[in-house]
Amino acid sequence: MKKTRIPAAVTAFIMMFMMSSCGNSSSGSDGSSGAAESSQAQSSDVSKAPAVEYDINGDIRLFNSFKEKYDGNYKLTGTLTTNENTGGSAVCFEVKGDLRLNSAVVDGMMTKRYITAEGDLYVISEGTTTYKKFNHDEIGNTVYKSPSYDPVFSGTGVFSSASVDGGEVTEEYALNFDGMEGTIKYTFDAASGDIRKIVIDSTDMNNTHEEVTDIVMSEPADADFELPDLSGYTRND
C-alpha cells in the first residue's frame, strides 16, 4: 500500500517530478535553455572538490559539501526518467529559504506552483487562466519542506554506503520523509564534486524508481518567486 501522508490538496512529489518542465514566463527561461546552459553553469557554479582518491570507508562525503553549498538556496534543472517514463522529462525546481517554485507542463498546458513567504500555496494554470490558493494553515509546514518542493535535500536520511566507478562517486542514503522509506543515491564527479545524477527508489511512491540526470545547479533568481498578476485569472478552488 502506498503511503499518502501529504495532504490531497497538494500533488504527490512523484507527479510533480514526472510532469515538470523548467520555465518562468517573466524571465523567459525554459527546459531547453536550462539544458543549453549546462556546461557554463556546471563550470561556474558548483562545489569544486579536490581531485583526491575517494575513500568509501572514510568519513568524508561529497554530499556534505554539496548540501552546504545548496541547501535552502538552489535552482535545479535536469532530465527525469522513471520506471513508467523512459523517454525523460525536463524538470525544474527553485528553493530560496521558505520560498518555492516549480513549473510543470501537463497536457500541453503550463502549471506553476508557488509557495510564498507567508507559506501560502498558489497553483496557477496558464493554459486555462485559473488558479487555486491554499492558505498556510491548510497545508502546514510539512508540505513546503517535503520532496514535492525540495526534492534534493528534504528526504535524505542517514548514509548507508558508497562506491566508485569510472571516475564517479555514488553515495547512498536512506530516504526518510514523513514515514516514506527507500533509498536516495547521489552520483558525483570524483574530481570536481559536480552532481551528476540523483536516483530515488521507494515502494511508497507510485513510480518506484526515479532518476534525474543532466543536472545543473545554480542560484535561484529572486524575480522567479514573484507571483504573476492574477487579475485576469479565475480562482476555482
Image: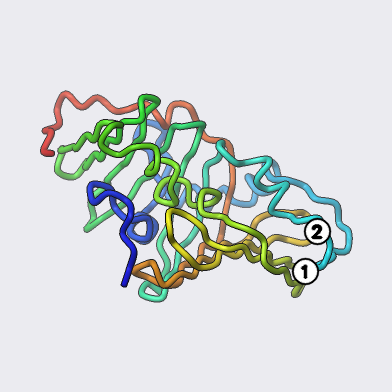
Disc 2 residue type (three-letter) = Ala
Task: Assign a secondary structure to mark 2.
Answer: loop
Q: How many marks?
A: 2
Callout 1 touching callout 2 (CB < 8 Å): yes
Disc 1 residue type (three-letter) = Gly
Residue 93 placed where, x, y %?
45, 46
From this view, report whether residue 13 is shown above or below residue 27.
below
Q: Categorize mark 1 by other alpha carbons within 10 Å: few (<14), some (14-19), many (20+).
A: few
Residue ranking furthest to the right: 52
The quadrant of the rendering that contains the N terminus is bottom left
Q: Residue at x 74, y 55 (%)?
A: 62
**Label disc, if present, on residue 98 of the rendered structure:** none
Q: Residue at x 43, y 54 (%)?
A: 178
The quadrant of the rendering that contains the C terminus is top left
Q: CA distance from mark 1 to mark 2?
A: 7 Å
Quadrant position of residue 171: bottom right
Residue 14 placed where, x, y %?
37, 60
Residue 6 placed where, x, y %?
32, 51
Task: Assign a secondary structure to mark 1.
Answer: loop
Q: Is residue 152 left or right of residue 145?
A: right
Residue 63 placed where, x, y %?
69, 53
Q: Residue at x 58, y 63 (%)?
A: 174
Q: Is residue 207 left or right of residue 55?
A: left
Residue tagged 2: 191
Q: Residue at x 38, y 67 (%)?
A: 205
Q: Please state which of residues 168 and 105 is positioned toward the viewer in this rendering.
A: 168
Residue tagged 1: 167
Q: Please state which of residues 62 and 137 is positioned toward the viewer in this rendering.
A: 137
Q: Is residue 5 left or right of residue 218?
A: left
From this view, report whether residue 134 is shown above or below residue 103.
above
Q: Earlier in the sequence, mark 1 or mark 2?
A: 1
